[in-house]
Image (tube, helix red, strand yellow):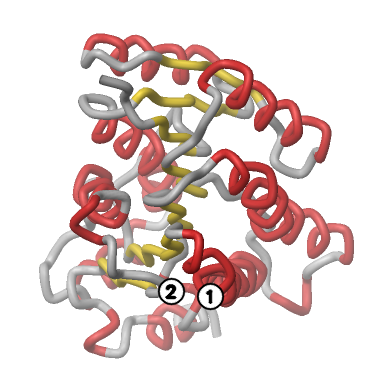
Amino acid sequence: MTRPVALVTGSGRGIGRATTLRLAPTHDVVVHFRRDEAAAGEVAKLAEAEGARTLLVRAELENEGDLDALVAAVRDTFGRLDVFVANAAAGAFRDTLATKRHEVGRTLQTIVASFVHLVQGVAPLMGTGGRIVAVSGTDSAYAVPAHALIGASKAALESLVRNLAVELGPRGITVNAVAPGPVATDSAARYYDRDPEAADILRAAIPAGRFADPAEIAEVIAFLTSPAASYVCGHVLVADGGLSAGGGPWALLAARRA
């Protein structure tokens, strides 16, 4: 039996790693990375141990040539794609008034333009039952200190999800987004090691009382890529432990900087 094929950008760490490994028992996987080939290679080996056929691809998300090469590699290796998870993101962490013009452009290129480019490339490889999931964040809906560009880009992703759901729905392809709250990733740990008070404020504002494990977000993504979610389309599924239900801690975080 032919296994479905999944591409998860930023597969080497955090939510991308967890999602790739969550899908590996049932999918062949394309492991994408930008810099850390060793980490991505480890993910590929773990996926292969689960029975997955793997393809390891390096690509800069802001480079159109790299994105075209990524799509071509998927097409030439598997001849199809069933799941595309746009997880990787990067951008300048600055207040809006301190942001340089080139930082605006690079952030939008990395998060927004790459998503559009890759969807345009992979949609022709998808048949009925195809799944596209964009990883957004609570900064798409709330003002977060130094997250203006990232948040704006994530909000743009959510708008694109709604439009693509309408455009691709008639072809049997669903398009959705997941908006995680704070997640206990390596990059988050490095940030909060420098600012443990911010971590404490966030935890206190989350009804669940803790950050999410990447595997918990991977489960949400896996649901949206599954047959069980065949009638979920154009939706942003918030997975934040109840953080947004209470209004969030953003004003408190910002007040510390006043």
Q: Residues within 10 Å of mark 2 (few under 14, many from 20)?
A: many
Q: Are marks 2 and 1 in contact (CB under 8 Å)?
A: yes
Q: Which residue is mark 2?
A: 234
Residue 116, visible in the rendered structure: yes
The x, y position of residue 112, in whole percent, is: 67, 60
Q: Which residue type carries mark 2? A: Gly
Mark 2 or mark 1: name the one nearer the start of the chain: 1
Residue 146, visible in the rendered structure: no
Residue visible at 18% across and 69% down in the picture: 241
Q: Residues within 10 Å of mark 1 (few under 14, many from 20)?
A: some
**Left or right, 85 with reference to 164:** left
Kindly indicate the quadrant of the structure image that contains residue 212: bottom left
Residue visible at 19% across and 73% down in the picture: 206
The x, y position of residue 39, in whole percent, is: 45, 18
Image height check: is 183 above or below 98? above
Image height check: is 57 above or below 205? above
**Left or right, 49 with reference to 17:** left
Q: Camera-side residue: 56 or 136?
A: 56
**Left or right, 197 with reference to 171:** left
The x, y position of residue 192, in whole percent, is: 38, 52
Q: Which residue is mark 1?
A: 166
- Mark 2 and mark 1: Cα distance apart in space: 8 Å
Residue visible at 25% across and 65% down in the picture: 200
Numbered disc 2: secondary structure: loop
Image height check: is 104 above or below 227? below
Residue situated furthest right in the rendering: 101
Quarter in which the N terminus is drawn: top left
Mark in front: 2 vs 1 = 1
Residue visible at 51% across and 49% down in the picture: 86
Kindly indicate the quadrant of the structure image that contains residue 229: bottom left
Q: Which residue type carries mark 1? A: Val
